[in-house]
Structure formats: C-alpha cells, structure tokens
Image (spheres, helix red, strand yellow):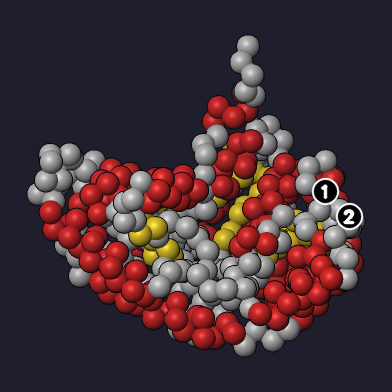
Amino acid sequence: MGIVADRLLAVKPSATLAVTTKAKELKAQGVDVIDLGVGEPDFPTPEHIRNAAKDALDRGETKYVPVPGTLAFRKAICDKLKRENGLDYTPEQVTVNCGGKGTLFNLIMATVNPKDEVIIPAPYWVSYPDMVRIAQGTPVFVTGKEENGFKINAADLEKAITPQTKWFIINSPSNPSGAAYTVEELKALAEVLKKHPHVWIISDEIYEHIVYDGFKSASIAAVAPELKDRTVTVNGLAKSFSMTGWRVGYAAGPVEVIKAANKIQSQSTSHAVTFCQSAGVVALNSPMDFLKERNDIFKQRRDTVASKLNAIDGISCRVPEGAFYLYPSVAGCIGKKTPDGKEIKTDADFVTFLLESEGVAVVPGVAFGLSPYFRLSYATSTELLEKACDRIKRFCGSLK
C-alpha cells in the first residue's frame, strides 16, 4: 500500500505552472528565456488598492474573520453583481475564497459525488478536469471547434447531457482561447439547460472586463433568469485588477451550495487573507478608470502578435474577443523535423523543441484538451512579445 491516495492517480500537475517552473529553471542556468506561459497581467495593482491594503494593516486587520468572508466585502460583491451584472444576491449567498481557483475547488469538492459528470467545453482551463477527478467525478469534454470560435453550441451541449450530469462549466471570456460568448449564444445554451433541471451551471467570469472591439460580457444567470437558482457565478480580483498574488476570489449562488463550499473552506484555508478583503472592498467600490488604458494596450499586443503569428509558415491564429491569450494552431508544423532530426508529432513536441532551441516558453494545447495548438499569453511587454515572435518565426523556418 503506497502513501499517496489513489484519487491522485488520474490527476496531473498544472501544465501552466509546470511550464513556468521549467522556464525559471532555464533562466537560473543562464538561458535567455521569454516566458509566455504565465496567465497574469504585467501591470501593477492600482495604487489606490495597494494603499487600501496598507491602511487595513495599519488598522490591525490581521486577525481571523468569518469563513465566508467579511460582511463588508460580501456586501461590496453583492453591489458589484447588481451594478455590473444585473444579478441580485444577499451576503448569505456569497463566499469569498483564496482566489478563483480556491473558489472553484471548494464548489467542486462540496458538490460532486463519485460518478457525477461535469461537462467542460474544450479547450478548457487546465484545472477544471483535475478538480473534478479529485472529487472522484467524471469530466465530460465537448469540443469547441476553431471554426466556431472555440465555442460550443446548443446541439453540442444537448448531446453531452446525461442523467449523471451534475454541472456544466462555462468560462467566458475563456482561458486559453480568449473566446467569449455573445448574449445570443448564451441564450441558446440556456434553452438547452432549461430542459434539464438536474444540471447546475458554474459561470467562470474572471476575465469579464478584459474584452475588446466593443464586446460586452454577460452573465448567463442574468441572460436566463430561470437558471439563476441553479447557477453559481464565480469571479475574483486577479485579472481585472492585476491582483493575482493577492488570492481573492468569490462566488455567488444558492445558499445551499454556498454553505457547502464554506464547509469545505472551514476545514482547509479558513478564509481569504483579511487585509486583502479590505482592499477588495475598495477595488470593487472604486471607478475602474485604469482599465481602459490597460485594455487598449492588451488589444494592441493581441493584434500585433496575431498578425506576426499569422505571417509564419505553419502557424495560424484566430483573433479572440477577450482575456489576454492567443491559441494558435501548429497543424502546419506537424510532421516536420528540427535541424537535428527530431520530428514534431504533437503540439507538446512543438512547445518542447521551441523552448529548447529558442528559449520561448508557451503551453501545449494538449494541456487544454484541444490539439494541435499552443497557448501564448500576451500579458507582457510589446518588446518581449515581438522578440518572441521573431524567435518562433526562426524556429518554424528551420523546420524541414
């Protein structure tokens, strides 16, 4: 009998964190590496939010607080959801957790039983399926094809639903593709979900504010109010506010589910960091004037990198609606060989050989459930992005 639990046999380490770790190891060895694998904005946390945390520390806000989160922060979340998303919740229907990841983990652990199925559109954020597996549930993948903007449609969803389906997870805008669902597309999915009252919905909206070209994000619980009583809306401060390391996420939904998630948290992390919650109140209650300039920069980077990638033989790249990722296809490189004779059979090979030969770190599409692609984060300087594109071009040009 081994020491490691059997439930971990089907679980893989986070691919994105693995790429970042490998890149850091190479950097430590003196290799010039451009890391485009990490999914966090390169902008600083806005000054007024940093000052709010400092003020909270000076007030001595370093003690335990209630497991669900401080009442002030949960009220601020309710106000935000009403103001920005058209959703009415009370503080009792809100849980605050250690990041969006911690929020999702608690929800899955609190609700998924062995043999329960969770529908996950692919390409997907790497942690969704493994969270389900840890809970001993079964992830069910539905492919969002590139020709459909990496999004699934109503017919795709209908085919995937069975009597064992517990959750449907929707992430819009998406990590890794940046794809975002329009109101009309959400309504079409909602029509299917209305017919299956045993299916609950997790709406991961962490990238809601990072959108381009006039796109407007929408919450499925607002688009289809009939689904609100079985929808949990998940969000956090990491992406829009450049607060990845602060680890503050939250969810709003039916009291029964929120209380169950709080029970899990009460036996694990207890609660999100106290003074970070105080800063969260200020973040949600203050104008987001800083966001337009940042999104304008993200858009310029998106357009620059997509254009450069589309000019490379063997690569094609869709321009997405949101987030700060591109998900280029390397179908044109499969079957080719590197100068030293290594054959590129998969997107994982492409990513490995690119890192080894040119020092550019990206994440293979296989980690997100859809090949042959890779994910590139453009949440870094334009100078580095252009340099990385030049290296990718050189690498692809060397293939035979």
Q: Who is closer to the viewer here, 222 or 214?
A: 214
Near mark 1 (Cα within 10 A), the count class, few <14, some 14-19 or many ≥20, is: some
Label 2 sits on a secondary structure element that is: loop
Task: Point out residue 390 in the picture as x, y percentages from the top left corner.
Answer: 23, 66
Task: Point out residue 41 in the picture as x, y percentages from the top left corner.
Answer: 52, 69
Chain-order first, disc 1 or disc 2: 2
Q: Is residue 111 above or below residue 252?
A: above
Q: Who is closer to the viewer here, 271 or 348?
A: 271
- Residue type at mark 2: give it: Tyr
Q: Who is closer to the viewer here, 278 or 378?
A: 278
Residue under label 1: 270
Q: Is residue 230 above or below residue 22?
A: below
Please tell me which residue is depicted at 55% across the width and 34% down the height of the picture. 11
Label 1 sits on a secondary structure element that is: loop
Task: Point out residue 305 in the picture as x, y percentages from the top left corner.
Answer: 32, 71
Q: In this view, does 109 lie to the left or right of 306?
A: right
Task: Point out residue 126 in the picture as x, y percentages from the top left corner.
Answer: 51, 48
Residue under label 2: 64
Q: In this view, does 261 lie to the left or right of 365?
A: right
Dots 1, 2 in contact, CB < 8 A: yes
